[in-house]
Amino acid sequence: MNIQQNIPLKKYNTFGISVNAKRFISVDSVYLLQQILKQEKDIFLISGGSNMLLTKDIEKLVVHIDFKGISIDREDENNVYLTVNAGENWHEFVLWTIHNDFGGIENLSLIPGNVGTCPIQNIGAYGVEVKDVITKVEALEIETGKLVSFSNEVCDFGYRNSIFKNEEKGKYIIVAVSFKLTKNKHTLNTSYGAIETELEAKNIVSPSLQDVSNAVIAIRKSKLPDPKEIGNSGSFFKNPVISKDQFLELQKENPNIPNYPVSDTEIKVPAGWLVEQSGFKGKRFGDAGIHEKQALVLVNYGNASGKEIYLLAQKIQEKVFKNFGISLEIEVNVIA
């Protein structure tokens, strides 16, 4: 078992935060992970590092999940059933499905991170959530080292939420995710956001899976910074869902407030709009800042510490609450 000492974690987190792991091991098989769990239960997991903000060195054994592999379990006339290991890069997996003309996740192109973390926060974009295509999640129970299978229903998926963020948090390590995708008669979702505008600009009337993916990639690149160039973790805050009554009161003073009805009694308000209206968009505080094109994205311009970015996030939360009476919830997992 190759456990390394004092390993820098900067390349293992998309914020590019310079902290160290006191002990570190990269695992490429479920068997090796089970052997580790026989010796240690209190471990710190890293996969794609795309949904975390590290604010200090990690004293626990850091286990880097690096399982690879995509398998086709079965097919029928209209669908294909896949199992994908947790260490596969999410965007590369999306591109693989498009290359094979498998439909269902093209709207989720260019989302950072690995497949194993996608169920945890039920990643979503442009009208699609990963829960729509997940059939089951396979995980190791940390206490026993046994493999457990969670059906879609048991995962209790919600908006940026799942059982793995709530009652089962810290109890399991996801090792593989299974999906049901379409082989033909694909249902394309092009009505959300700027996808239709992007397709029209390219004179595409009957888009393919590739066309939709290209449109999403173009939109995301125009709004979001590349973590390889500017450290970030994508959307830092959740879009808050408030009561219709609260929204109507806000609308009196903010007639142009964007909104998306969730139900007859609830309205979703874009967190990025709230942050921008509070004066933070494009602002920089040392090397910690808010992206100039997307107020929902906090960035590390080079040498910001995790603590500096977290303090900035708290400052934003306070100002938004003061201005709008809305509590912004952090979407990123803060390790403080």
Image: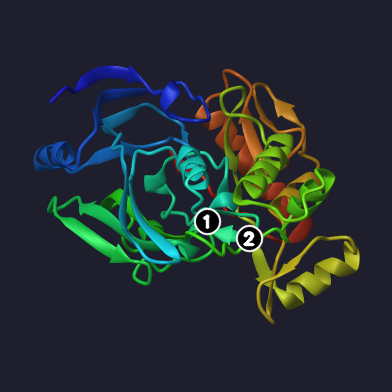
> Helix or strand or loop: what does disc 1 sit on?
loop
Q: Are marks 2 and 1 in contact (CB under 8 Å)?
A: yes
Q: Position of residue 124 (x, y in %)?
A: 56, 55
* Spatial separation of the CA atoms under disc 2 and disc 1: 8 Å
Q: Which residue is mark 2?
A: 188
Chain-order first, disc 2 or disc 1: 1
Q: Is residue 76 left or right of residue 185?
A: left
For the question of whether residue 278 can be seen, the reply is no
Closer to us: 138 or 54: 138
Q: Position of residue 302 (x, y in %)?
A: 60, 18
The quarter of the picture where the N terminus appears is top left
Residue at the (76%, 59%) spot, across then down: 324
Whether residue 22 is situated above or below residue 213 in the rendered picture:
above
Write down the quadrant of residue 309 in the picture.
Answer: top right
Whether residue 300 is situated above or below residue 176 in the rendered picture:
above
For the question of whether residue 73 can be seen, the reply is yes
Q: Which mark is residue 103?
A: 1
Q: Is residue 216 left or right of residue 52?
A: right
Q: Is residue 230 left or right of residue 307?
A: right
Is the image coloured rainbow, by chain, by secondary structure, or in one colour? rainbow
